[in-house]
């Protein structure tokens, strides 16, 4: 039993005329008769009693009529919804983004996306970079924004390179400076994100071939907490430049690093073996456009 046969049955059942039913369906009477015959063969019995003068439903045909109406209504509803999803008339997108991107770049991208596709809802998980990678890896979200991932199962498309900057507290002796050397910075207690943070690992790697040693005295789970610790005078830190507005708002002073150019690519992350929905692909295109201009 297929949709064509059900539509044929419903048209004949409602009109009790093969002539009128074939006109309604824009098909020939012979094609309509073949569809009804195929339906009856698949069901194992007659649904119509047909004479030269009339067409009547059999008892089985009577019982099929409300079921056919419901089945076709459900089919049309599903068909319409999927058409809407493919045409971006409705839909839902769930993404994960590290907080520095989520608060500074993502709102501009979402504003543009919502202007283009106002009926698509967007769920944003603003989580640390490691959680972004995990959520994409296990399929909790279709798209992530973060630093370049390590798992081979994930694809990465860079948007821009985020340089790292130093943050120091007021009264630290760097008030009149625009740049600071690593050696001078490490004379103060260093505050960092907790391991296995990608930021923490990157800072350690950047000093691996240097005589300097990164001795972390305080750790936090969020960069905003690191910034507040620095602003309070507990120490200094190095953070992605994308966080600059938040660090300054918390009261920390932002300085460039004089003797090092530390940067990490920020980009879009997705699973290589999972197909993205039409809505996610549309957001991906907007993020490529807006995210490549983070300022």
Image (cartoon, rainbow, N blue to C red):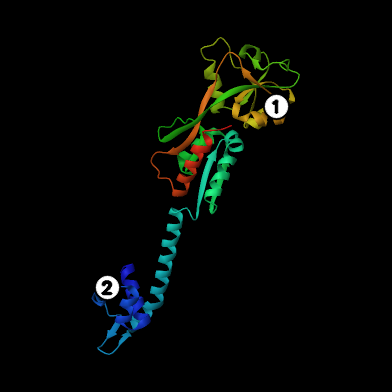
Q: Measured from the top left, where is residue 212 in percent x and y?
A: 58, 11
Give the quadrant of the C terminus: top right
Hey, which residue is sitting farthest right in the picture? 171
Q: Is residue 196 visible?
A: no
* Residue name at image x 29 percent, y 88 percent: 54
Nearer to us of marks 1 and 2 is 2
* Residue name at image x 45 percent, y 54 percent: 85
Q: Secondary structure at mark 2?
A: helix
* Residue name at image x 62 percent, y 13 percent: 181
99 versus 37 height, above or below? above
Marks 1 and 2, how far apart at CA: 75 Å
Q: Measured from the top left, where is residue 137 in percent x and y?
A: 46, 39
Drawn side of residue 97 relative to residue 50, left or right = right
Which label number is shown at residue 229? 1
Which label number is shown at residue 281? none
Q: Secondary structure at mark 1?
A: helix
Drawn side of residue 139 relative to residue 111, left or right = left
Circle 2 is placed at which residue position?
35
Drawn side of residue 272 relative to residue 268, left or right = left
Q: Measured from the top left, where is residue 238 in percent x and y?
A: 62, 22
């Amino acid at each position: 039993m297929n949709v064509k046969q059900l539509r044929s049955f419903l048209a004949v059942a409602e009109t009790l005329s093969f002539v009128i039913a074939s006109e309604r369906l824009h098909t020939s009477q012979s094609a309509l008769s073949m569809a009804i015959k195929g339906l009856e063969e698949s069901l194992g019995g007659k649904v119509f009693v047909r004479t030269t003068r009339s067409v009547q439903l059999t008892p089985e045909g009577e019982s099929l009529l409300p079921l056919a109406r419901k089945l076709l209504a459900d089919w049309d509803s599903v068909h319409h919804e999927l058409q809407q999803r493919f045409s971006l008339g409705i839909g839902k997108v769930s993404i994960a983004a590290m907080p520095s991107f989520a608060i500074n770049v993502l709102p501009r991208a979402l504003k543009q996306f919502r202007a283009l596709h106002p009926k698509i809802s967007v769920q944003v998980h603003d989580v640390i970079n490691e959680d972004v990678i995990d959520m994409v890896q296990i399929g909790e979200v279709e798209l992530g924004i973060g630093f370049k991932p390590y798992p081979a199962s994930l694809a990465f498309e860079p948007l821009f390179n985020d340089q790292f900057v130093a943050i120091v507290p007021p009264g630290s002796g760097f008030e009149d400076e625009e740049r600071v050397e690593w050696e001078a910075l490490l004379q103060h207690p260093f505050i960092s994100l907790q391991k296995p943070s990608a930021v923490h690992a990157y800072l350690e790697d950047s000093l691996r071939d240097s005589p300097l040693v990164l001795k972390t005295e305080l750790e936090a789970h969020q960069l905003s907490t690191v910034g507040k610790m620095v602003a309070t005078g507990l120490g200094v830190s190095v953070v992605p430049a994308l966080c600059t507005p938040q660090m300054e708002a918390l009261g920390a002073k932002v300085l460039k690093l004089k003797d090092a150019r530390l940067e990490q690519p920020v980009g879009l992350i997705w699973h290589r073996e999972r197909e993205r929905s039409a809505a996610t692909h549309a957001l991906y295109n907007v993020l490529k456009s807006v995210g490549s201009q983070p300022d």
